[in-house]
Amino acid sequence: MGSPPSAHKRRRTVGGHLLLLLWKSFLLRKKQWILTLFEILLPTALFSVILFLRLLPDSNFIPVNVNQTTVSPVLNEYSLLRNVCNGLVIGNTCQFVPDDIKKRVHMFYAPNVSFAADTAEYLATRLGWPPEALVAVNTLEEMDSLVEQTYYSTNANASASVVVGLHFKDLPEDQSLPNALNYSLRMPGLWATAAQYPFFQLPGPGNSPDKYVNNGFALLQSWIDRLYISKLTGNMSYMDGYKLEIESYPYPPYTDDSGMSQIYGTLLPSYMILAFVLLSPSLIKNIVHEKETGVRVRCLSNNVE
């Protein structure tokens, strides 16, 4: 059973319009063959460059298949503290930190209440930082501003500094312990917490987990959480009787091509759109010009092709 005549006629009309547009484009392209050649060669050249980079003998963009699961070693709390300690680790505490290092460490905490101050002092003691490294502020915005200013101002020279920001949320006004621990931890230059995932992700185990583990972020989190549990339960064994062991999550087999596949997935659709967009303006310009001047109608009326 066939389609209704109106639907068949409508499809034929749409098909006729498409064929007419293609024929019109072909006629205009014949008149402007240099522009047409440029519009064809430009996308071809872009794709050829991408293909050439991937086919070079010593190119880093040649796909390499990693057929085994990447497993990271298990690190204990002593190893984590040793990575960030600039002195000697004695009894799970960093000691004998040089004086020049003590001048380049800063910790801003908020709000200025007893629980936040006790936590900051405990962290500074475990890290071997002097009491003058601690600065109390009132709000998260003030802390973020001071952390950023201090980090960029003190790291402008060769002597890099370590800046930590710690802000506790929803602390009781009566100086008692909170029912739930909610805090923000800042360590600029060591571990970025502004985004949950990097903007441009590459296949394979990245270096971000190593920064999280080896630069002290995970260690400070563990100390803060265990100190809160100890204060809440009145049992200080959570600080000394339990030790942190951490391991990056295993990464399954993957193909490493230095991000070229991600570049293809991001730029290839854009290149395709640009390749066709370049064809449209000149075609539309010529059609509008013919409609406005009526030159095509005059040519047909005079039997001129």
Image (cartoon, rainbow, N blue to C red):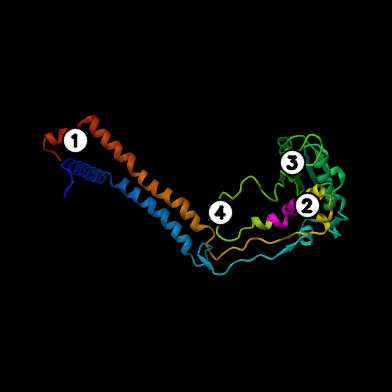
User: In the rendered image of this protein, does residue 215 appear above or below residue 28?
Assistant: below
Circle 3 residues within 10 Å: few <14, some 14–19, many ≥20: many
Residue 158 placement (x, y as % from top left): 76, 50
Residue on which the image places disc 1? 296
| Residue at x-position 66% and y-position 60% | 248
Real-space Cα distance between discs 3 and 2? 17 Å
* Stretch of the chain drawn in magenta: 211-226
Instruction: Classify the position of the C terminus by image quarter.
Output: top left
Real-space Cα distance between discs 3 and 4? 29 Å
Residue on which the image places disc 2? 226
Residue 78, image quadrant = bottom right
Outermost residue, bottom direction?
67
Residue on which the image places disc 4? 201
Closer to the camera: disc 2 or disc 1?
2
Q: Amino acid at mark 1?
A: Arg
SS assignment at label 2: helix
Q: Nearer the viewer, residue 54 or 224?
A: 224
Circle 2 residues within 10 Å: few <14, some 14–19, many ≥20: some
Q: Nearer the viewer, residue 32 or 11?
A: 11
Q: Is residue 45 left or right of residue 146?
A: left
| Residue at x-position 15% and y-position 33% | 298
> Which circle's residue, 3 or 2, is located before the other in the chain?
3
Closer to the camera: disc 2 or disc 4?
2
